[in-house]
Amino acid sequence: MMRDTLAYRDDKRFMSLYALAKTGSIAGNDFLYHEVQETLDPFDWDAYNARRLPLWAVATDIVFGVPAYLEIRSPPG
C-alpha cells in the first residue's frame, strides 16, 4: 500500500477532491483497488501462491486492546 501511495500521490484520481467529486470517495477506491492493482501495478499472484512462509495479518482486539494475529490461509479477493 505504501508503494502505491508514494507512486500515485500526485494523481488526481487518488486522494483528491477530484476523486471525491467523480466517485464519491476521497480515496479513489476504484482507481487504487482496480486500475492500479489490475493494470498499472498488477499483484504478483504467482509469487504469492509460491510462498512457503505463512502470512499473518495483525488487527486490534477491540475488547482487550491487544494485538490479534490472524493467519491468512486463502488469497484475498
Image (cartoon, rainbow, N blue to C red):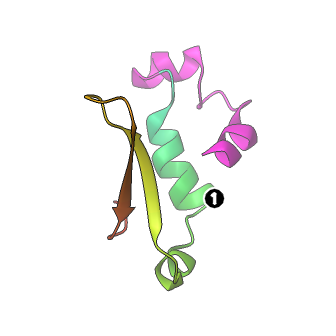
Residue drawn 46% across and 50% down?
Answer: 34
The region drawn magenta spans: 1-25
Front residue of 72/14: it is 72
Front residue of 37/18: it is 37
Which residue corresponds to mark 1?
A: 41
Badge 1 local density, few (<14 within 10 Å), some, or many (20+)? some
**Image position, residue 40 (x, y; %):** 63, 56
* Looking at the image, residue 24 lies above or below residue 13: above
22 within the magenta span:
yes
**Image position, residue 5 (x, y; %):** 67, 38
Front residue of 56/46: it is 56
* Looking at the image, residue 9 lies above or below residue 34: above
Say which quarter of the image contains residue 37.
bottom right
Front residue of 32/62: it is 62
53 within the magenta span:
no
* Kind of residue indicated by mark 1: Asp
Label 1, secondary structure: give it.
Answer: loop
